[in-house]
């Protein structure tokens, strides 16, 4: 049975959390956003307002609808203010201990039937859930970056997740306009499990086949039908983010293809992080 979600909490309003909160308020859901400081929370609200206002400028949204959406977002620094949430989506730093500690706190303040979802990319949802005494209500809701634009959400069933919690998360993802898929809690879930070693292979081919960056991208776009070349994609994701995700997957699976290619590690160490630093495989 799916639970009706009237109010959602989003914890951590960084790159992912702010995007998720934006999706929720735009879908008409009362949303409580929690950050570690008022300043960071307000910065996130400004970013959300900026993106929603751009739609008004483009003529795809009217000002009244924008104001109503932004009016649904309340901000807090207190976990206790999430007490009335039917679903809480956690998007804080990618570290096990802070996530476990937060889930313990959420379990204390939220109603017993509230669903707790983590947006972790590489940690085990089962391990996060194990910090609580009610692991059946903990699931993964893995959004993709940028959350407002990428349609997919992986609904991750941990070892002890209940059907109700998984169904509730799935239905909520649909309600906010996403395309959910279901999977079990395994390293990388579905998309990263496939995509990360594939991108690592592409980077290794740069050296093995002595193909140029632009030719490799052209090859994958025109020979494999990719919408974007692998080097363009790694630049967009962030070379540091990709290296970190590769290391996390390699640590769990010990499959050599998961390990970050030395070329990417060297780029990360040199500060060539892709689009966000102005230089990666390409210059921006
Ligand atoms: N960036 C991506 O491409 C991406 C994609 C999918 C999933 N994720 C996952 O989403 C999560 C967040 O990633 P991000 O890229 O948004 O990180 P980020 O660093 O941009 O944001 C994290 C935010 O959480 C806040 N925070 C930290 N501890 C907190 C706490 N206890 N309570 C409230 N706020 C807290 C920080 O102040 C920061 O603003 C991670 O688990 C990450 O693995 C990231």
Image (cartoon, rainbow, N blue to C red):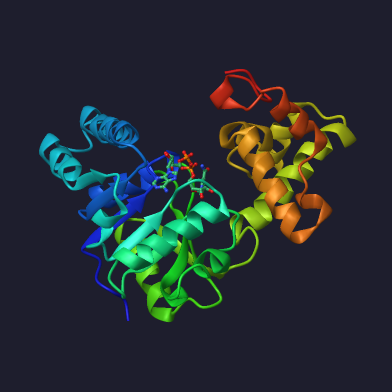
Horizontal placement of 223 versus 233: left or right? right
Q: Residue at x 79, y 39 (%)?
A: 261
Task: Describe residue 284's horizontal placement relative to residue 197 as left or right.
Answer: left
Q: Residue at x 27, y 66 (%)?
A: 86
* Quarter of the N terminus within the rendering: bottom left
Q: Residue furthest left?
A: 64
The image shows residue 208 at horizontal and vertical percentages of: 89, 36
Give me the residue at 72% from left, 59% from top.
Answer: 252
Q: Is residue 114 visible?
A: yes
Q: Position of residue 184 (x, y in %)?
A: 57, 71
**Measured along the vertical axis of the image, is residue 129 above or below residue 251?**
below
List x then y, in percent, for residue 226: 62, 43
Q: Is residue 275 left or right of residue 104?
A: right
Residue 56 x/y as whole percent: 21, 32
Nearer the observer, 243 or 109: 109
The C terminus - image quarter: top right
In this view, the residue in front, 100 or 144, is 100
- Where residue 202 sits, quadrant-wise, is top right
Rendered position, 48 above or below 272: below
How many numbered dots are placed on residues in this image? Answer: 0
Q: Which residue sits at x=67%, y=38%?
A: 230
Q: Residue 27: tell me if it is visible.
A: no
């Amino acid at each position: 049975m799916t639970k009706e979600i009237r109010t959602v909490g989003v914890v951590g309003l960084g790159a992912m959390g702010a995007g998720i909160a934006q999706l929720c308020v735009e879908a008409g859901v009362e949303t409580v956003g929690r950050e570690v400081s008022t300043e960071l929370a307000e910065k996130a609200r400004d970013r959300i307002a900026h993106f929603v206002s751009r739609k008004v400028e483009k003529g795809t949204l009217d000002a009244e609808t924008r104001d109503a959406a932004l009016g649904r977002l309340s901000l807090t620094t207190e976990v206790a203010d999430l007490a009335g949430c039917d679903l809480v989506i956690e998007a804080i730093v990618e570290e096990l201990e802070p996530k476990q500690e937060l889930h313990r706190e959420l379990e204390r303040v939220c109603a017993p039937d509230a669903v707790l979802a983590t947006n972790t990319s590489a940690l085990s949802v089962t391990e996060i859930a194990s910090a609580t005494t009610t692991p059946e209500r903990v699931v993964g809701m893995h959004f993709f970056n940028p959350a407002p634009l990428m349609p997919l959400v992986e609904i991750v069933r941990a070892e002890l997740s209940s059907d109700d919690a998984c169904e509730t998360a799935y239905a909520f993802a649909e309600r906010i306009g996403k395309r959910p898929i279901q999977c079990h809690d395994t390293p990388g879930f579905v998309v990263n499990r496939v995509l990360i070693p594939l991108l690592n292979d592409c980077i290794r081919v740069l050296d093995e086949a002595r193909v140029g960056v632009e030719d490799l991208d052209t090859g994958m776009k025109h020979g494999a039908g990719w919408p974007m070349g692998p080097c363009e994609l790694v630049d967009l994701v962030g070379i540091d983010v990709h290296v970190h995700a590769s290391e996390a997957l390699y640590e769990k699976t010990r499959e050599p293809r998961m390990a970050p290619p030395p070329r990417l590690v060297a780029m990360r160490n040199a500060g060539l992080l892709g689009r966000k630093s102005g230089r990666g495989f390409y210059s921006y």
